[in-house]
Image: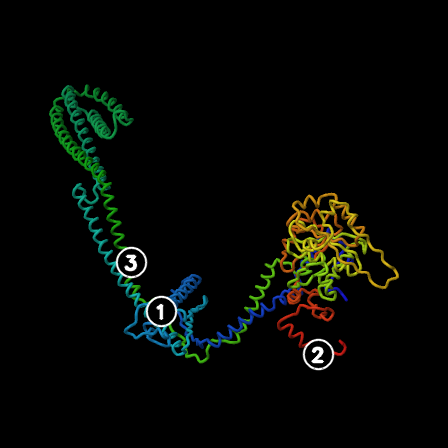
Amino acid sequence: MNSIVPAYQDEALYGTVQDREQRGPDPAMYNLQLRYIQRIIMRHRWLIVSIVGVAVALAVLSQILATPMYQTSSTVQVELTDEEGANQAEAASRNAQRVENEAKIYRSRAVAETVVRDLELTSNSRFMGSAARPEGRVREQDRALATTRLVNAVSILNNEKSDLIDIQVTLAHPKLAARIANQYPDAAQKMRLTRREQRRVQLLAGLDKQVARLAGDVSTAERRVADFRRQAGMLEGAGGAEDLAQINRIAAEAASADGMRSAMAAKSAGVSRAAGIHTIAGADSPLLQQQEREYESLLNEKARLSSLYGSGHPEMVRVQNQITALEGNIRRERAAAAAVASAQANASAAQQSAMAASDSAAATARANRLKGELSQLLSKAYSNTSNNVELSRLEREAEVARDVYMATHKQAEQVRALLGVIGVNSTLVSPATVPTDPISPTPKKTIAAAFLGSLVLSLLLVFAKELMDDKVRSVEQVRRWFGLPTYGMFPLIPGLHTTSLEDSPVVREPQSLFAEVARATHSEVVDLGRGYQPHTVLITSPLPGDGKSTVALSLCAAACAVGRRAIVVDFDLRRPGVMQDIQRQSEGPDLVELLLNPPAKYLPARPEEDPASREIITYKPELLSVREPVKDPASLISHRRVAVLMERLREQYDLIIVNGPAALAVRDARTLSQIADHTLMVLCWGRTTIDEVKATMQQMSGKIDAAIFDKVDYAEHARRGYGDSVQFYMDSAAYYTGEVPQKSGIWAWKDRIFKRWSPPWTA
């Protein structure tokens, strides 16, 4: 019969142990294949079935208890108007915003509250149920509750590229749903008009008050300007271009009067000199008259130029030179005609001198008066220039006040004009009709959604549980994670407590499932060594309590049952255990005594086999342990006498099984691995974690040849469907005696039903 647990020792497929150590785990084994997913689902099928069943049952129950709901909708169109010639892109954006704003208005609680008031929903028992109240006893919280229910029952839908808005109402009463859907546009319009009127009154009142205040500010600012002009004596335009023009005009007249005064004075002096010359000469001639006329002309020109230029001016110099030259000519001419013209010239010269003096006095008086007026105007102009700074500030304040007043007044007029227009409005284009078919409950959709959703949820939970589960349970896990073969999976026997070597299930029930696993494990151990040559095997585990003592004793019993001399040497000396209990019952020496005394004295000689005998020689399992825990086992294990003892045991036994302590507890297991040919690691099924195995591999420096599972729950392992031979152990139950773990549940019932009939070719 094939072994219950397959050995992964095929070197053609996996290579030798040394190859596996160098190669490490096969990367291809890490791929999550479809069959592996199937096994995970089958492993947790009851959890999936439970979650899906509960979800579907709840969905069915909810559909049975659900109240039928009806849905109806009305459609309104938003009126969009734009000026002719407006930019189309801007108009489209503006219209989309208008539609969105209108939809927001429909979604507001204010519109819902208006509908509640218009339809008196707080008193409607079909809408409020037991919370309905008579109209006269409606409280504010009742209206708020009705508004909340209405908001939850109404859905406002709008499309960005459309001017239509759908009002969907979902209620248990179809007629009431249609009434509410058709009432929404009227309620929105009513609320809009009411709020617009309230806003118009409030806004206009504020604007009128502000206009009146600004009008007073303008009047005050203008009054300040007038008062300042009056106090400063500034007429309109004072200190400006008008004053400067007047000053320039008077200055020009004063300069002209001063020039005339100088001319008259020069003329008077010339007349006086001419009179003296005529008196001396007393003669006149046409040439003299001509020269005198030229002389007078030059004097007039000199007087005129003196009012305009200084004495050093080139024109003045030229005229003076001409006058000087002409005076010489006149003197010469007068000297010739002095006698003739002297008498006639005296009278004429005196008359002209008097007239020139009179004209000069008049010109002098007029020039002095113009200079006084000019001085007064200049003083006033300087004063006005200084006052212009304050005047400009007051005028600016008045101008600002006038501008603010005009802007506010214009705004008030615009508000009056705009508030008289309704603005954006919406019109009911498709009234809601009374629905006849309910939209819920929908049993098929709900149950299908519950089934699919719960199935997905259960699968997620299963894979999450699988990912979070770090317990080692299968041969595949050991091979995939650590690249190790598994030599055996010892079944869990509740209450198993070995009190003697003969009490082992391998000895008591040689045809049991436990004994078959032990023999299969022994076969793998034999293949691990050099055939049937004597060799030493170390048994260790990550932590205490993983079952290494049971495995060691069972392996020893299986070896003895097939005619091999086997002994268990217990080096787990730190704490009491089953092997020490068995050692206390024996009469032979314990391990410490053998180490301290010559071992040959106490080890019996190996019996000789009779080749003619047809019986298979079997041996009794033997144990070598201590009666009491050792205080310092580390020094004992490291002693050279241990190696001597092991060499002596090799001469007497075919298989030496060393029961070492837990690898993660102390370092003794690593020390013992140096004297053992091979090392096996015992894993407690469903308790040992992946991290514990990793730590053990690190502690042992990878010197582990294979793994052995202990305390395997065969029924649970088969139910999980790991795909190994344990999954089919019930099919081979007829080969075993004693109690075999039985499957339970619907799958065991299914197997029993279908196995009652089988085709003839399977008999």
The residue to which callout 3 is attached is 411
Quadrant position of residue 421: bottom left
Compute the Cα span from label 1 to label 3: 42 Å
Q: Which mark is residue 357?
A: none
Quadrant position of residue 101: bottom left
The residue to which callout 1 is attached is 145
Seen as rendered, the residue at the extreme front is 587
Identity, as a three-letter code, of the amino acid under mark 2: Trp
- Tell me whether the residue at label 3 lies in contact with that at label 2, contact meaning CB atoms closer than 8 angstroms: no
Q: Is residue 447 left or right of residue 563?
A: left
x and y, in percent, of residue 419 in the image: 30, 64
Look at the picture and state if 425 lies above or below 206: below
Compute the Cα span from label 3 to label 2: 100 Å
**Which mark's residue is nearer the viewer, 2 or 1?**
2
Q: Is residue 83 left or right of residue 760?
A: left
Marks 1 and 3, the one that precedes in the sequence? 1
Q: Is residue 423 left or right of residue 457?
A: left
Q: Nearer the viewer, residue 208 or 528?
A: 528
Residue at disc 1, secondary structure: helix
| Label 2: few (<14), some (14–19) or many (≥20) C-alpha neighbours in 10 Å | few
x and y, in percent, of residue 469 in the image: 60, 59
Q: Is residue 40 left or right of residue 218?
A: right
Residue at disc 3, secondary structure: helix
The residue to which callout 2 is attached is 757
Q: Residue at x 57, y 66 (%)?
A: 458
x and y, in percent, of residue 231 in the image: 16, 42
Seen as rendered, the residue at the extreme right is 612
Residue 238 visible to an observer of this rendering: yes
**Which mark's residue is nearer the viewer, 1 or 3?**
1
Identity, as a three-letter code, of the amino acid under mark 3: Gln
Q: Nearer the viewer, residue 92 or 138?
A: 138
